[in-house]
């Protein structure tokens, strides 16, 4: 009985691994020397090819709303701060908004709107806020300073989940 259980467990753990093993042509590299093909598990041995983005692709621009009422803008920013598509920014921005948005005037709210909707890559916001990369001059403003201070978390608040709505 125990032998049958070990065999069944062994099959269950090896079957997914074997299912992910693939063979590909190694081309000029030679492969394993027999048929020019090489075994690859989980594509860890496949070289990653990264291409630069072409210059002719236009970046989408966010349609800013100049006549939007301030309370509506703040409601929209609460939603957009929580749904970034990247957990790190979801946590940082949603806790920042929960703490500061109610006290922001129209000018600071506009700066925050331009920050989170003007940047095309959320990793940029994350790296600027955590000070891993220098902030470009067009985004270095009072809101960015407040965000950097919030990210530094001098009070050592626990931010493991987004605040309740």
Image (spheres, rainbow, N blue to C red):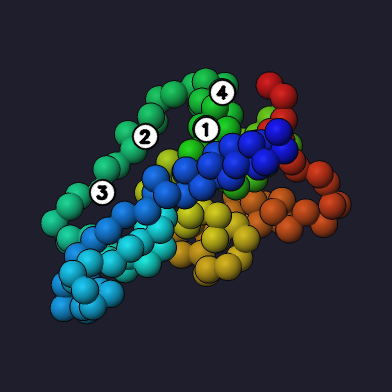
Q: Position of residue 11 (x, y in %)?
A: 53, 42
121 left or right of 156 in image: left
Gap in Å between the C-alphas at discs 2 and 4? 15 Å
Q: Position of residue 79 (x, y in %)?
A: 54, 27
* Residue placed most toward the observer, 138 or 97: 97
**Which residue lies most toward the left here?**
56
First along the sequence among labels 3 and 2: 3
**Helix, strand or loop for disc 4:** helix
Gap in Å between the C-alphas at discs 1 and 4? 13 Å
| Residue underneath mark 3 | 59
| Residue underneath mark 2 | 64
* Residue placed most toward the observer, 88 or 137: 88
| Residue underneath mark 4 | 75
- Residue at horizontal 52 percent and vertical 69 percent from the top: 134
**Helix, strand or loop for disc 1:** loop
Where the C terminus falls, by quadrant?
top right
First along the sequence among labels 3 and 1: 3
Mark 4 is surrounded, within 10 Å at the Cα level, by few (under 14), some (14 to 19) or many (20 or more) other residues, namely few
Q: Do we see residue 23 in this rendering?
A: yes
| Residue underneath mark 1 | 83
Q: Are marks 1 and 4 in contact (CB under 8 Å)?
A: no
Q: Do we see residue 110 in this rendering?
A: no
Q: Nearer the viewer, mark 3 or mark 1?
A: 1
Q: Are marks 3 and 1 in contact (CB under 8 Å)?
A: no
First along the sequence among labels 1 and 4: 4
Q: Nearer the viewer, mark 1 or mark 2?
A: 1
**Helix, strand or loop for disc 3:** loop
- Residue at horizontal 59 percent and vertical 37 percent from the top: 8
Q: Position of residue 65 (x, y in %)?
A: 38, 29
90 left or right of 54 in image: right
Gap in Å between the C-alphas at discs 4 and 3? 26 Å
- Residue at horizontal 84 percent and vertical 52 percent from the top: 156
């Amino acid at each position: 009985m125990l032998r049958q259980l070990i065999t069944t467990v062994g099959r269950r753990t090896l079957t997914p691994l074997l299912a992910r093993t693939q063979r590909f042509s190694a081309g000029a590299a030679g492969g394993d020397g027999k048929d020019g093909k090489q075994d690859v598990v989980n594509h860890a041995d496949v070289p990653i090819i990264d291409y630069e983005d072409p210059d002719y692709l236009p970046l989408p621009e966010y349609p800013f709303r100049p006549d939007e009422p301030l309370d509506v803008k703040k409601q929209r920013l609460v939603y957009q701060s929580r749904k970034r598509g990247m957990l790190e920014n979801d946590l940082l921005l949603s806790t920042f908004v929960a703490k500061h948005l109610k006290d922001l005037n129209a000018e600071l709210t506009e700066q925050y709107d331009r920050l989170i909707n003007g940047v095309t890559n959320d990793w940029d916001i994350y790296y600027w806020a955590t000070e891993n990369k220098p902030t470009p001059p067009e985004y270095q403003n009072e809101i960015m300073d407040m965000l950097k201070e919030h990210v530094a978390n001098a009070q050592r608040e626990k931010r493991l989940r987004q605040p309740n709505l």
